[in-house]
Image: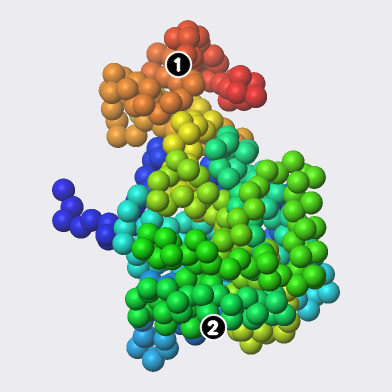
Amino acid sequence: MSTFKAPKGTYDLIPPDSAKYLAVRDAIAAPLRNSGYGYIETPGFESVELFARGVGESTDIVTKEMYAFETKGGDKLALRPEGTASVLRAALEANLHKAGNLPVKLWYSGSYYRYERPQKGRYRHFSQVGAEAIGAEDPALDAELIILADQAYRSLGLRDFRILLNSLGDKECRPVYRAALQDFLRGLDLDEDTLRRAEINPLRVLDDKRDAVQKQLGDAPLLRDYLCDACKAYHEEVRELITAAGVVFEDDPKLVRGLDYYTRTTFEFVHDGLGSQSAVGGGGRYDGLSEMIGGPALPSVGWALGVDRTVLALEAEGVELELPSTTSVFAVPLGEEARRVLFGKVTELRKLGIAADFSYGAKGLKGAMKNANRSGARYTIVAGERDLTEGVVQLKDMESGEQTAVGVNEIVAELESRLG
């Protein structure tokens, strides 16, 4: 046994379970690809300052959870704890917003890193699929992203998730609410760190998961009571659009997100079968983030959905994904001439897009057929010296057990016909 293990709070994706993760990623990405979103990939690490400015210096992500380090050249970098700031940075650097076709619609998939206390559904290395629509302030864009996430989850067979929706206001109305909330929080019995956070970003206190804090927040002022007319109208249109699309949601006036850049629309996808780590994804509008990281005014909206937690949600509901077979045809050669011939046939099948595998290692018939069974192949091709002398191979249907002789030169066409 190896003396090395995966680092604490991480996991390895290995077959056959890894196929679930690939299927979830593909399902989440599919509606995005069909809606004008192009794929983007950013580095696994960025400048620490990018996240400090964008995510927020007072957030737990920046103050406690970020993997930060200094390079030999003196650069201060961090493993990316989230995707939005990186994607927006890349879009600005490439001047995508100047191409004249706003919004810039991007989707991405990758690994993210946070130093958290590991538990089921919360890892130090985790996977997300995300989407960002950059450069347009339009309630229809907010609604589109919520609808696409709902579509992705339902295509996987998930049913027991809920969509929570709120508005965080904008630079006009949020300062008034901020002041009212700070006055309220100053009158509570909070520890020193929480009081300090309340002075920097009081909305973050509402997101505190500790029972001792939540019990005191029952009478906290609600942001919806402070929204300006423009924010009220904007939020109402988002609600109307997703309702018209048949998407069910719940208004949650206490919903805030753990990142500082959110404005107006904010939403979260939760699954009650996951225990304390119930959020499977979330997002919202971040109209001021571009200016925070040195860009022009580019109102934007986006979300990120957790692949790990979506898999856990599927398991909680007992949903079995229909995964394509990794192998459709398995070739078993008996003898050197058969190895040469069947290896060529396997190569031809693969070129036609048929998943085919081969019995490697000069195994006997019994051991090779065990491998064929384990592979999950629908058909097995077996050939020995006598078969090749007669110009045939034996084609075995692994479901019915029926075996027939097929001409060597016809076997590829026969399998292509059978597998469609």
Residue 226 in view, yes or no: yes
Question: Disc 1 marks which residue?
Answer: 398
At 80% from the left and 64% from the top, the residue drawn is: 233
Percent position of residue 192, x then y:
35, 80
Cα gap from disc 1 to disc 2, whole angstroms: 59 Å
Residue 94 in view, yes or no: no
Count of numbered circles in the view:
2
* Disc 2 crowd, CA 10 A, few/some/many (<14, 14-19, 20+): some
Percent position of residue 288, x then y:
67, 79
Amino acid tagged 2: Arg
- Relative to residue 318, is residue 410 drawn left or right? right
- Relative to the observer, which residue lies in front, 273 or 127? 273
The nearer-to-camera label among 1 and 2 is 2
Rendered image: mark on residue 275: none
Percent position of residue 71, x then y:
37, 85
At 68% from the left and 67% from the top, the residue drawn is: 225
Question: Disc 2 marks which residue?
Answer: 53
- Residue 360 lies, with reference to residue 412, above or below; the image says below
- Relative to residue 365, is residue 285 drawn left or right? right
Amino acid tagged 1: Met
Percent position of residue 200, x then y:
49, 83
- Relative to the observer, which residue lies in front, 155 or 327? 155
